[in-house]
Amino acid sequence: MAAIRSLAGASSFALHSRQLQGRLVPLVRTASTTSPPKPRLLEKPERFNPPSHGQRLKQKPKTYGAPLSEAAREAQKTKQYPHMMPPQGTFLHWFLTNRTIHTFITLGILLSLVFGTWFQNFVYTTPYKDLLPPNSMFFAHPYQFLRQYVEVYGLHTQWNTENVMEKRKASVDDVQKRAEYRKAHGLDAGDKAGMFGGWTAKTDAEMMGPGLKTGTADSNAAEINAVLEVPAVTELPSEPAPKKWLGIW
């Protein structure tokens, strides 16, 4: 019993000391009453936008061993390697990398092809081929050779112009004959004929083109029959196609 009483007294003394200590020491609350701040969150972009000016690192050449000296680098510029561009400072390197020279070469080739095609076409299509000077005359008398070529080319141009004028005249005559035929058979119903009012002018006051005109609308039947009896214009005989080399000349 004495032991139990001693234990009960010790426990009550410890409890009393703790209560007394709690009364003497004021209560202090270390916890904060406000909620902690939320971390800053960046807005999520819709897509990846790389920077417009990224950081560029210096590209160092990969060299194994000790770095090259200035003399070795200069020697590399003038060294010729197989299957590689010629070194800088040489004539061949300047010729291969000069854009002006390549432009002149390209234009020269194109102009030479154009002139060659035009010359071959002129030689094989002109009816005055027998008037052309021989090629051996160019070295003996170059000025006379060129002058004779120019004269023959003038005749060739005049011949082409006459052929074109004859074809146009034949087309106009054919249109006029068609118009007279339609008038004679009553196919033209006055101003209502066609979308554009017929083929030709109806009176002498009306003109067709630069100086071309038709007869009056009240022409007699004899004139119409005379026009109809004229034989149709036949096509001009075309020259046989010249033989070409490799399908070009």
Image (cartoon, grey):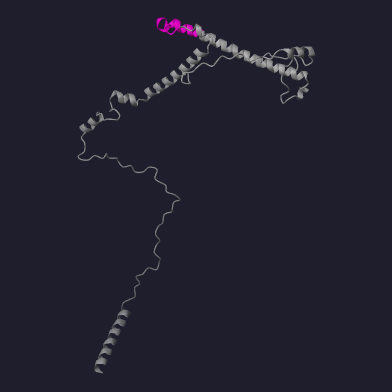
Q: Residue furthest bottom?
A: 1
Q: Is residue 115 above or below residue 72?
A: above
Residue 23 pos. (x, y %)? 32, 80
Q: Magenta stretch containing residue 145, yes or no?
A: yes
Residue 135 pos. (x, y %)? 43, 8
> For residue 174, what is the image quadrant?
top right
Foreground residue among 10 and 212: 212
Predominant secondary structure in magenta? helix
Q: Is residue 17 above or below residue 1?
A: above
> Which residue: 71% across, 18% down?
178
> Which residue: 20% across, 31% down?
71
Residue 58 pos. (x, y %)? 30, 40
> Which residue: 24% across, 92% down?
3
Q: Is residue 53 above or below residue 105?
A: below
Foreground residue among 201 and 249: 249
The segment highlighted magenta reads 134-151
